[in-house]
Amino acid sequence: MKRKTFRNTVFLFIVGVILASFITRPGLNDFTAYLEKSGQLKSPPSIEHSSSGLYSTFTVTYFEPVADTVAGGGSKIVAVPARKESYIGFLGRFWKQ
């Protein structure tokens, strides 16, 4: 009888974790707020978001302004991709990959 109780408890714990991860799966607005709070934004990045049933993945591309010369002798500022970072959102939190 004890073995069956333990098995049921483990099963309910696993179901509870899966249900909690589904309910607290972070979205794009949550991730944008996380980036703004962390203070990493100097210019607006490009954010790619994909979501599965239990977690979300985010790929952030940061851009740097670079002066570029134009054929007429002038210059213009162009945004050039500087670096990419990947994050996983799970249970309402974010981790860098």
Image (cartoon, rainbow, N blue to C red):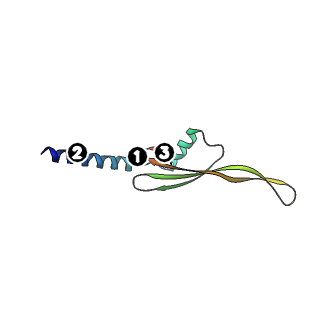
Q: Residues within 10 Å of mark 1 (few under 14, many from 20)?
A: some
Q: Residue at x 56, y 43 (%)?
A: 35
Mark 1 or 2: in front is 2
Residue at the (48%, 45%) spot, across then down: 95
The kind of residue tagged 1 is Thr
Binning the other alpha carbons within 10 Å of mark 2 as few (below 14), some (14 to 19) or many (20 upward) gives few
Residue under pointer 3: 95
Secondary-structure class at tag 1: loop
Q: Which mark is residue 94?
A: none
Q: Is residue 85 left or right of residue 10?
A: right
From the top left corner, tell me how far across and down residue 16 is, in percent.
Answer: 30, 46
**Going 69% across and 53% down the picture, which residue do you hit?**
80
Q: Position of residue 48 (x, y in %)?
A: 55, 55
Bin the neighbour count of mark 3 within 10 Å (Cα to Cα): few under 14, some 14-19, many 20 and up: few
> For residue 9, which numbered disc appears in the image?
2
Q: Earlier in the sequence, mark 1 or mark 3?
A: 1
Q: Secondary structure at mark 3?
A: strand
Please name the residue that numbered disc 1 is placed on.
Answer: 24
- Element class at badge 2: helix
> Badges 1 and 2: C-beta atoms under 8 Å apart?
no
Q: Give x and y (percent) for residue 79.
A: 70, 53
Give the foreground label among 1 and 3: 3
User: CA separation, marks 1 and 2?
Assistant: 22 Å
Amino acid under label 3? Trp
Quadrant placement of the N terminus: top left
In the picture, measured across the screen, residue 81 lies left or right of residue 72, that is left
Residue lying farthest right? 73
* Mark 1 to mark 3 CA distance (whole Å): 15 Å
Q: Residue furthest left?
A: 1
